[in-house]
């Protein structure tokens, strides 16, 4: 073993000396080669300078008399002959700063030599030329680059091989020991890290590390067993505590739900008593209003129409056809269900031209929805007392329409009061009938016409002839609530869209407004009882809850979609009434 240890370091020293000698010889050879190339380049440069001097002397002697005598043709011949030599790529002759002859193409990479031409001690012109020096320059640059490259390779080789030998003999074993020590410090006691170290001088250190690692590993294994046992006990206890805590939380949640239910039940019980009292108080004035309204309608349709012929005996031209037209104008069926388009209105107004009182006729047709009678009413403009007749039509139509609105509103108010009472007492029985959804929506719009005026545009998308079998009075509560909420969301100004369409055995009604939308954090509470965003003066927050219960009683669904600037409430109902 001692002989092997002696032989290995000796072999290493001999190898280092041999490599160093080779590197030195290579370095000397490279230096001599670079010197030779540099000497050759200087010699070529000297030859190039000599050639340029000869060309300069020749041109100076030849061009002097020629420029003096303005012999341009001979100058061109001399210049052309010089360019044909191949080593002069560019030459030009100047006289008084003006170019006389030029030949070739100037190269930006070659120097331009400029020389004055004298004749009889006077400057008669000048010439400039480029001498091809590319081969010499390339040779010199190549020699210099070769020398630098060769010298750099030697330095790099010397700088790489020598540290490699030192690292191979000394640094690598020490690095492996350092890696093993760092692994031990990090908790890795693998013996493979030390068994890979082949240098015998480090074997005692390796063995010491191996023994230390084995002892530490045994201690760690024992500690790990104790730690695993402790973790199992803690985990079991934690699971027991977690299960107990979940049971407690569920109990608390159930108690809160029960408390909320009791509070809501108490509220509903109080509300039922309050609604019953309010309904009783409201029914009396509503009955009086309804009775008075019926009397007013009878007076308008019968008494007034009987008195008008006698009154207008003093108005020339007021005859039976006009009276008949007036009677038709105040009939409820005279008003349109779907207003004309903007284009149709403009065309009709244009057809009136500049006739007197045409603006009053337009107001009459527009305000009271008399579009179906527009052609008959247009004849009033040709009446000799058209202004008086139109004023009469305006007055009587206004009275009749107001009476109709009061009657409709009274009926709806009675239905709402009765429905609130039914809601409070949870009465679900109601008469089923065939309900025209388009007609019901248009009736609801009539109730809100005063609130909408000209600030709300209505867009209708009705599939014709859609009807369902349901409770008309209860569904009217739904439409009134949805339209009222839409107008409130728009602050009475914007666009209201109503849509009715049928798909299979179900009918869908959509009410869309262009309001601010429902905040995302409140969308989950929209259908809760007593929840409202309108403040104390905006209601009790029961509208959508009532709508949801009514739709559910009809075996339907109500949902909504909302984003800033657009909210849609969608009611889906079965085409036929549910059995039972």
Image (tube, helix red, strand yellow):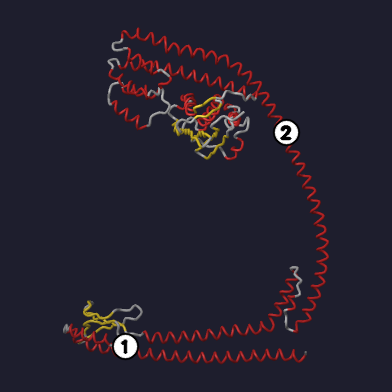
Q: Residues within 10 Å of mark 1 (few under 14, many from 20)?
A: some
Residue in front for this viewpoint, 65 or 458:
458
Q: Give x and y (percent) for residue 384.
A: 27, 15
The mark nearer the N terminus, 1 or 2, is 1
Q: Is residue 306 left or right of residue 411?
A: left
> For mark 2, what is the residue?
258
Q: Residue at x 81, y 75 (%)?
A: 211
Q: Give x and y (percent) for residue 19.
A: 61, 90
Badge 2 element: helix
> For mark 1, what is the residue?
52
Residue in front for this viewpoint, 542 or 71:
542
Question: Residues under labels 1 and 2: Cα distance?
Answer: 115 Å
Q: Give x and y (percent) for residue 233.
A: 82, 55
- Against 462, residue 194 (above or below) is below
Residue 109 in sight: yes
Q: Is residue 179 left or right of residue 221?
A: left
């Amino acid at each position: 073993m001692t002989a092997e240890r002696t032989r290995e370091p000796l072999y290493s020293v001999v190898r280092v000396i041999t490599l160093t000698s080779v590197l030195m010889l290579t370095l000397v050879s490279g230096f001599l080669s670079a010197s030779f190339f540099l000497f050759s380049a200087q010699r070529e440069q000297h030859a190039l300078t000599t050639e340029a001097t000869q060309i300069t002397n020749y041109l100076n002697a030849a061009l002097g008399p020629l420029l003096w005598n303005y012999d341009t043709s001979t100058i061109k011949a001399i210049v052309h002959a010089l360019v044909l030599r191949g080593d002069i790529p560019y030459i030009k002759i100047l006289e008084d700063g003006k170019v006389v002859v030029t030949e070739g193409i100037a190269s930006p990479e070659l120097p331009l030599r400029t020389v004055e031409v004298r004749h009889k001690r006077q400057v008669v012109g000048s010439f400039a030329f480029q001498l091809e020096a590319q081969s010499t320059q390339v040779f010199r640059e190549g020699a210099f680059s070769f020398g630098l490259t060769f010298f750099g390779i030697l330095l790099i080789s010397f700088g790489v091989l020598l540290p490699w030998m030192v690292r191979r003999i000394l640094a690598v074993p020490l690095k492996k020991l350092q890696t093993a020590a760092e692994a031990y410090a990090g908790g890795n006691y693998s013996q493979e890290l030390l068994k890979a170290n082949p240098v015998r001088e480090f074997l005692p250190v390796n063995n010491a590390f191996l023994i230390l690692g084995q002892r530490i590993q045994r201690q760690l294994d024992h500690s790990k067993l104790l730690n695993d046992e402790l973790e199992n006990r803690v985990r079991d206890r934690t699971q027991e505590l977690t299960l107990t805590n979940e049971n407690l939380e569920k109990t608390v949640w159930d108690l809160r739900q029960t408390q909320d239910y009791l509070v809501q039940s108490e509220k509903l019980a109080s509300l039922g008593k309050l609604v019953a009292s309010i309904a009783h108080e409201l029914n009396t004035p509503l009955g009086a209003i309804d009775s008075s309204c019926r009397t007013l309608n009878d007076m308008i349709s019968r008494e007034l129409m009987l008195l008008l012929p006698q009154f207008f005996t003093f108005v020339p031209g007021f005859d039976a056809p006009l009276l008949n037209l007036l009677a038709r104008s105040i009939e409820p069926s005279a008003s349109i269900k779907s207003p004309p388009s903007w284009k149709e209105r403009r065309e009709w107004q244009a057809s009136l031209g500049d006739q007197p009182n045409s603006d009053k006729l337009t107001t009459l047709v527009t305000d009271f929805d008399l579009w179906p009678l527009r052609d008959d009413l247009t004849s009033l403009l040709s009446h000799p007392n058209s202004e008086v007749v139109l004023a009469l039509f305006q007055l009587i139509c206004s009275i009749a329409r107001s009476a109709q609105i009061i009657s409709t509103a009274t009926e709806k108010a009675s239905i709402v009061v009765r429905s609130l009472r039914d809601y409070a007492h949870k009465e679900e029985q109601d008469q089923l009938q065939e309900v025209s959804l388009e007609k019901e929506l248009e009736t609801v719009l009539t109730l809100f016409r005063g609130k909408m005026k000209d600030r709300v545009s209505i867009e209708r998308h009705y599939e014709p002839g859609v009807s369902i079998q349901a409770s008309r009075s209860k569904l009217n509560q739904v439409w009134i609530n949805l339209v009222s909420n839409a107008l409130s969301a728009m602050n009475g100004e914007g666009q209201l869209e109503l849509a009715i369409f049928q798909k299979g055995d179900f009918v869908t009604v959509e009410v869309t407004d262009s309001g601010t939308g429902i905040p995302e954090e409140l969308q989950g509470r929209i259908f809760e009882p007593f929840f409202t965003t309108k403040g104390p003066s905006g209601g009790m927050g029961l509208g959508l809850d009532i709508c949801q219960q009514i739709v559910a009683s009809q075996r339907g669904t109500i949902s909504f979609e909302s984003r800033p600037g657009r909210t849609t409430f969608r009611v889906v109902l079965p085409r036929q009434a549910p059995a039972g």
